[in-house]
Image (cartoon, rainbow, N blue to C red):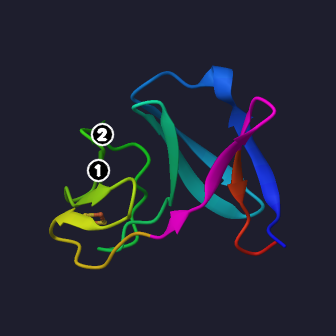
Amino acid sequence: MAQWVDAAPVKDFLEGEYKALGINGLQAVVYYYEGNFFALEDVCTHDGGQLSGGRFTHGEAICPRHGARFCIRTGEVKAPPAYEPVTTLPVRVHEGMVQIEDPYG
Ligand code: FES
């Protein structure tokens, strides 16, 4: 059975904003976009940089190191130099809290 862990209260997010969070040893980025939450592992597949710190526009996360772009919904690469998708994390809202499914839970 999935173990859901609290990320942050829903009220702490603004539309078009993201938060980088450390959860049970996992580094994640949670995006709030068009009224929905999405979560990616905070590791760029190009060279292991953190996606957090980069811009987020039109549903795409832009790695601040070399500019690779990833779809926040699917993790799919939208622009090089990365060629492998970023890991997506299941996310839900429960009792006013954004939660992420702990892949190690
Ligand atoms: S580490 Fe992300 S684009 Fe190079």
Q: Measuring 29% from the left and 50% from the top, which residue is drawn there? A: 64
Tag 1 secondary structure:
loop
Farthest residue to the bottom: give it.
84
Identify the amino acid type marked 2: Arg
Q: Measuring 30% from the left and 39% from the top, which residue is drawn there? A: 55
In the rendered structure, the answer to whether residue 92 lies left or right of residue 69 reads right
The mark tally for this picture is: 2
Identify the amino acid type marked 1: Pro
Q: Which residue is mark 1?
A: 64
For the residue pair 34 and 89, the one nearer the viewer reads as 34
Query: Vertically, is 27 above or below 77?
Result: above
Q: Residues within 10 Å of mark 2 (few under 14, many from 20)?
A: some
In this rendering, the label closer to the viewer, 1 or 2: 2
- Specify the quadrant of the image occupied by residue 30: top right
Quarter of the image where the N terminus is located:
bottom right
State the mark number for residue 23.
none
In the rendered structure, the answer to whether residue 2 lies left or right of residue 47 reads right
Residue 34, x across and y down, in percent: 39, 31
Query: Label 1 CB, ligand 1: below 8 Å?
Result: yes
Q: Which residue is mark 2?
A: 55
Q: Earlier in the sequence, mark 1 or mark 2?
A: 2
**Chain part drawn in magenta:** 87-98
